Image: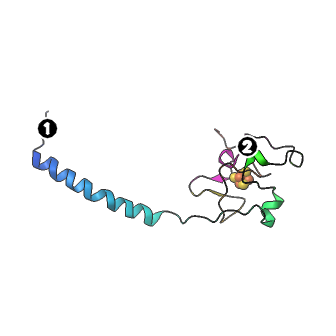
């Protein structure tokens, strides 16, 4: 069965699609989670976990279990949707960061 569309149908469809795109943007921004403040490496709890904003700058002598390929984005505690971490609620962490609580995220 062959369906045909009139030019009017195509034009009105394009018009409604064009009108809908900005509306979706407003809805998306209204429901987006507010940005979390960055975790300060000098925060007492961050220090307890030896949190570093850059995994390549972790003190290897003080953290013998650390490996350079361990980062927050490969950690099971990392919350990709917000950039947050389950260990530091209400704070965001650097994707390339690291701390002693790092646990490999399955599939990474
Ligand atoms: Fe990063 Fe994982 Fe430590 Fe959270 S627990 S700061 S995601 S390494």
Provide the residue designation for mark 2: 70
Left or right of 73 in this view: 18: left
Read off the magenta span.
66-81
Relative to 42, say whether 81 is above or below.
above
Q: How many marks?
A: 2
Circles 1 and 2 in contact, beta carbons < 8 Å:
no
Left or right of 22 in this view: 16: left
Provide the residue designation for mark 1: 3
At numbered mark 1, what does the secondary structure look like: helix, strand or loop? loop
Say whether mark 2 is within 8 Å of ligand 1: yes
Depth-wise, is mark 1 or mark 2 nearer the camera? Answer: 2
Q: Residues within 10 Å of mark 2 (few under 14, many from 20)?
A: some
Q: Return the x and y of residue 74 as percentages of the image width and height.
A: 67, 44
Which is nearer the eye, 16 or 56?
56
Q: Return the x and y of residue 46 as percentages of the image width and height.
A: 78, 61
Label 1 or label 2, whichever comes before in sequence order: 1
Q: Quadrant of residue 52?
A: bottom right
């Amino acid at each position: 069965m062959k369906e045909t569309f009139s030019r009017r149908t195509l034009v009105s469809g394009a018009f409604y699609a064009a009108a809908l795109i900005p509306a979706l943007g407003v809805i998306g921004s209204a429901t987006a989670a507010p940005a979390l403040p960055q975790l300060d490496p000098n925060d007492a709890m961050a220090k307890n976990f030896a949190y570093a904003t850059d995994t390549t700058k972790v003190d290897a002598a003080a953290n013998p279990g650390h490996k350079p390929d361990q980062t927050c984005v490969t950690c099971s505690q990392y919350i990709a949707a917000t950039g947050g971490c389950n260990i530091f609620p209400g704070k965001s962490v650097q994707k390339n960061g690291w701390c002693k609580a790092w646990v490999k995220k399955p599939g990474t």
